[in-house]
Image: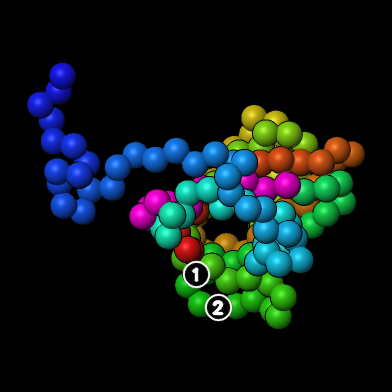
Amino acid sequence: MSNSPTATDVPGRVPPSVVALSDVPVTPAAEAVTKVRIARLITKQRNGSNLMLGAAWMDPGERTNVWSSRGDNDVSEGDHWYGPVEETYFIIRGQLRLTWDEGHFDLGPDDCVYLAPGWTYHLENTGSEPAFFTYSMTPSQE
């Protein structure tokens, strides 16, 4: 048995938690700020985390709106400004194209991409099958 303090013994310490994808509601594309189906698993509200982790689904031909992580809100109506955040994507299934200010990346299963603050970008499913991927963002938006 360990003599280490437990999470409940240390004020402000958040204990580890498990969140099952099946326990999180999926936000339909029409309601999501991303314009694709998302499920936010790890959030500030649910877990007290400054890191948000989510899952997303995109059908063939589906495209997100434009997202911005620049310091100033520079997006058009219908697009989404996050402010200066760091973001990652890990592709589990499907083929995606990430288009950013200076080019694009074609992504497939087992690819991971990191986006530092300061860019505008969007994703498109360029494949013939539905895509599924995880994303993380810090600081958490909710």
Q: Is residue 53 above or below residue 142?
A: above
Whether pointer 2 and pointer 1 mark residues with C-beta atoms closer than 8 Å, the reply is yes
Of residue 14 and residue 68, the one placed in the foreground of this image is 14
Asked if residue 78 lies in the magenta stretch, the reply is: no
Q: Determine whether 67 is above or below 110 in the image.
A: below
Q: CA distance from mark 2 to mark 1?
A: 7 Å
Q: Residue 7 at x, y = what percent?
A: 22, 41
Q: Which residues are magenta?
A: 47-57
Label 2 element class = loop
- Residue sitting farthest toward the left: 3
State which quadrant residue 91 falls in.
top right
Which residue is labeled 1 in the image?
Answer: 83
First in residue order: circle 2 vs circle 1: 2
Residue 34 % position (x, y): 67, 62
Quarter of the picture holding the N terminus? top left
Residue, x 71% and y 67% (percent of image)? 31
Name the residue: 85% across, 38% down: 129
Residue 64 position (above or below residue 17): below
Could you tell me the amino acid type at mark 2?
Asn
Q: Is residue 73 left or right of residue 124?
A: left
Q: Nearer the viewer, residue 71 or 44?
A: 44
Image position, residue 54 (x, y; %): 57, 48
Q: In the visual, does 26 lie left or right of 87? A: right
Q: Which residue is pictured at 79% across the width and 57% down the height?
A: 63
| Residue type for callout 1 | Gly
Viewer can see residue 3: yes
Reading the image, the residue beneath label 2 is: 73
Please tell me whether residue 51 belongs to the stretch shown in magenta: yes
Instruction: Count residues near mark 2 (Cα–Cα under 10 Å), then give few for <14, some for 14-19, many for 20+.
Output: few
